Image (cartoon, rainbow, N blue to C red):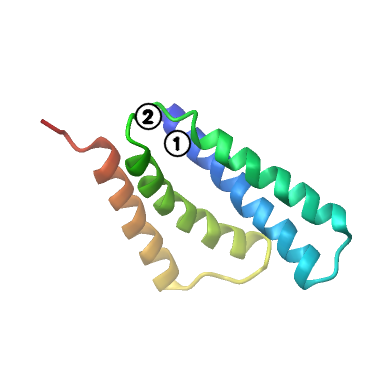
Amino acid sequence: MFYAIIMFLFAGLAEIGGGYLIWLWLRESKPIYFGAFGGIALVLYGVIATFQSFQSFGRVYAAYGGIFIVLAVLWGWLVDKKTPDMYDWLGGAICLVGVAVMLWAPRT
């Protein structure tokens, strides 16, 4: 379980960080190397996600979506300085419950 969570965190940071660097390049006129590093980070995100030990591609990516939502809220708070409200936290908690159900529910 620890390994799965770490892989989700690394994948999320690569995806959000890569997207953010491309955002800075295109929306805030940062130098092109921001976009290049963002592209590299997005490729790394795709590679990191394949290191999950779960067998189902769809299940891994669905569960990752919930992790991504929580990481995006945290990124907005820590990097963009936009304080999440109660509904952001509630939505994130609901997503994490959904991730736990998808990945670790007993299956027959």
Task: For label 2, count other residues whose C-alpha is less than 10 Å away and answer few (under 14), some (14-19) or many (20+).
Answer: few
Query: Which of 108/91 is in front?
Result: 108
Question: Along the line of sight, which residue is nearer the eye, 40 or 12?
Answer: 40
Asked whether the beta carbons under mark 1 and mark 2 sit within 8 Å of each other, the answer is yes
The answer to whether 87 appears left or right of 82 in the picture is left
* Disc 1 residue type (three-letter): Ile
Q: Residue at 32%, 59% (x, y): give it.
A: 94
Q: Which mark is residue 5?
A: 1
Q: Residues within 10 Å of mark 1 (few under 14, many from 20)?
A: few
Residue 15, image x and y in percent?
Answer: 60, 49
Q: Quadrant of the C terminus?
A: top left
Q: Which residue is mark 2?
A: 1
Task: Residue at 15%, 33% (x, y): give it.
Answer: 107
Local SS, label 1: helix
Q: Residue at x 35, y 30 (%)?
A: 54
- Quarter holding the N terminus? top left
Amino acid type at mark 2 = Met
